Amino acid sequence: MKLAMIFPGQGSQYVGMGKDLYENFGYVRELFDQSNDILGFDLKKMCFEGPEEALKMTSHTQPAILTMSTACWMVLRERGITPAAVAGHSLGEYSALVAAGAISFADALRLVHKRGMFMQESAPAGGMAAILGLAPDLVRQACTEASESGTVEVANYNCPGQIVIAGEKGALEKAMELCRGLGAKRALPLQVSGPFHSSLMTEAGKKLAAELDKINFSQPSCPLVANVTADEAQTTLGIKELLVKQISSSVRWEESVQKLTSIGVNVYIEVGPGKVLCGLGKKIIKDAQFFNIEDASGLENILANLKEVI
């Protein structure tokens, strides 16, 4: 049995996340207090009490999810549960890097806070939409045809039957219309503040590159499958380059899970808020086991069901 930890991205946050762990584990209390000190605002209160609108701001959401996911990982680590491989969806890749020992939590926290600010500042008018029940080549075809109206591209290959596109408002709406015409079951606009994971975010990537240059990365302690390539990140320099590309490139999540499966992974733990990645994973790999941890009961479920790998 081979276990991978997978880490969720933006959109998985909710008011109240982390409170149960904070009340049950002293080292989680220290982690949230450290986050407050580094960021200079009360992230802990925002996570536990809201308001939701403040938590949903990209510059707040990203450090909040990183802190929550790191807290969950620490709970697993303290029980002797370590991953044979890691991956993270978009923002979650930073949590995966922390879990693999490639970057310190403090450095990751500062990076994702700035990443969130850069994404907010650089986001042009536009958005994202989920396309359900349409083959990838037809989604790409729709984006190509709609590009006469502006930029629109595939942002996420999430799982079979679920692709996310991103772009400028007019082109995005045109692509959604074309996808419906090509047979998509649904084309749904997403509640996001910009066209993330598209070439429209290139400027944010340039700003992020300057911040990444200031950080020392270590070689990951286990295979880390990167969003951009859906393959193992091989060098510390390569990791930095991939993190820059990631902000304006498609998240190849379906292929990333398939890559983890190809190296022998058959148990997945979603580490952080929500169960989004468990849901996607079950559609990608039918015969694997999926668990999540976001509170003490999630830990108990994992301990009860994975005794043979602990």
Image (tube, rainbow, N blue to C red):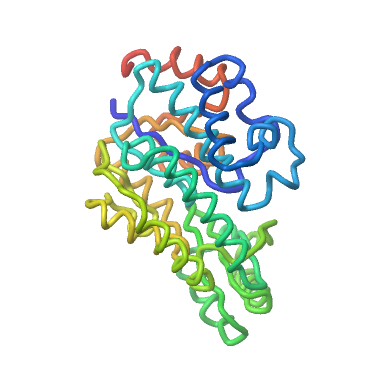
Q: Nearest the camera: 205 or 90?
A: 205
Q: Position of residue 196 (x, y in %)?
A: 55, 63
**Res 55 quadrant in image:** top right
Q: Relative to residue 149, is residue 211 depicted above or below?
A: above
Please state, as top left, top right, bottom left or bottom right, where the N terminus lies in the image.
Answer: top left
**Residue at coordinates 59% horizontally, 35% vertically from top-left?**
36
Q: Position of residue 112 (x, y in %)?
A: 50, 50
**Residue at coordinates 67% horizontally, 37% vertically from top-left?**
14
Q: Is residue 276 left or right of residue 191?
A: left
Q: Position of residue 63 (x, y in %)?
A: 55, 43
**Residue at coordinates 44% horizontally, 65% vertically from top-left?**
249
Q: Is residue 84 left or right of residue 21?
A: left
Q: Nearest the camera: 71 or 225?
A: 71
- Total tally of numbered discs in the picture: 0
Q: Is residue 12 left or right of residue 288?
A: right
**Residue at coordinates 49% horizontally, 27% vertically from top-left?**
72
Residue lying at the far bottom of the rendered structure: 148
Q: Relative to residue 276, is residue 304 depicted above or below?
A: above
Q: Position of residue 20 (x, y in %)?
A: 62, 20
